[in-house]
Image (spheres, rainbow, N blue to C red):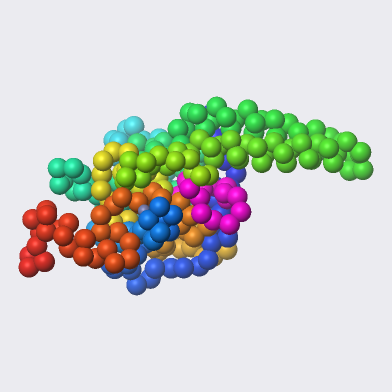
Amino acid sequence: MPLSFRGCFDYFHAMPCIVLDSITPDTVTCAGYCRACGREHLLHAGQALELARRLMGQLEEHGRIDFDVPQAEADPRFGLDYLNGPARGQMFGVLAYRDARGHTGALKAFSCQYNGAWLVPGWVPPVVDAQVFARIHDPVERRIKALGREMGALPAVDPRRPALKQQRKALAQQNMKDLHALYQLHNFRGLTRSMAEVFLGPGGLPTGTGDCCAPKLVQYAARNGLTPTGLVEFYWGRENSSGTRHQGEFYPACPERCAPILGFMLCGLEGQGRGGAVDLERELDSNGVTTEDR
Ligand SMILES: [Zn+2]
Ligand SMILES: [Zn+2]
């Protein structure tokens, strides 16, 4: 049964309209302040830029996002028509990496869920275990909906309505806290922390924190011994309702949900952060690519 996680698609409204229209491999695409180091860690577009353009071509060519499986096994839920319907488009991300043996590769992610699915073949899984998420979320969601129906059946002036409304609100807030507690973030120092513990934003965690492409990709890399060398996020599908996101445009990691956790998540990467250019040179040298070669 598909999950419904409200907030998946409406969180673009709150985002400032920053378009990376002059993006190059050197553009900083995600960054966050790290409390442990007392400075910012960041990633550039790097090779992910070219790989993302290739991914856009694949989306256009196949008309579905599960193109890693043969056409005969394609899941109708994963067609691109979904992104042009009422749900509108969503964000996609690409992370270029180098593994422990020096081989390069790429990971891809979609933001939040795709048409109700957390898991699609060929795409990185969510930060949270989708089955555990469903086990916690689904029964509470059913209770919240039942309370809504109960309220709807009462006359507008019924004295029982405020209590039911309050009960529903408390349930929703507790549900969000319980769900956020399931998100355990990994970084490149081998540390694991709960998302609530590392979040550096004002107030509580916004709905959807940890479900954007950048945290999904960085989490997967950190857990699998892959060193990110670039990351980009782009929008695909019908423009969002506020008209701030358009198909094929690149956007930096969002300031509300991602920047407050990315400082912790990117900690331990060589050559990152302000003044990290020297480290990066050294890293390239150690892999046999000298400054003279480039
Ligand atoms: Zn984000
Ligand atoms: Zn750090």
Q: Is residue 54 left or right of residue 281?
A: right
Q: Is residue 57 visible?
A: no
Q: At x 51% / y 50%, what residue is drawn? A: 199
Which secondary structure type mostly characterizes the magenta part of the structure? loop
Q: Is residue 233 magenta?
A: no
Q: Is residue 239 left or right of residue 143?
A: left
Residue 184: give x, y in percent of width and height: 45, 38
Q: At x 78% / y 40%, what residue is drawn? A: 166
Q: Is residue 23 left or right of residue 18?
A: left
Q: Is residue 203 magenta?
A: yes
Residue 104: give x, y in percent of width and height: 19, 48
| Residue 107 in the image: above or below residue 117 | below
Residue 91: give x, y in percent of width and height: 44, 53
Residue 156: give x, y in percent of width and height: 89, 43
Q: Depth check: give the residue in front, 73 or 34.
A: 34
Q: Depth check: give the residue in front, 280 or 251.
A: 280
| Residue 159 in the image: above or below residue 213 | above
Q: Is residue 173 left or right of residue 148?
A: left
Residue range highlighted in magenta: 198-213
Q: Quadrant of residue 136?
A: top right
Q: At x 40% / y 52%, what residue is drawn? A: 36
Q: Quadrant of the C terminus?
A: bottom left
Q: At x 29% / y 35%, what residue is drawn? A: 70
Q: Is residue 226 visible?
A: yes
How many numbered tags mark residues here?
Answer: 0
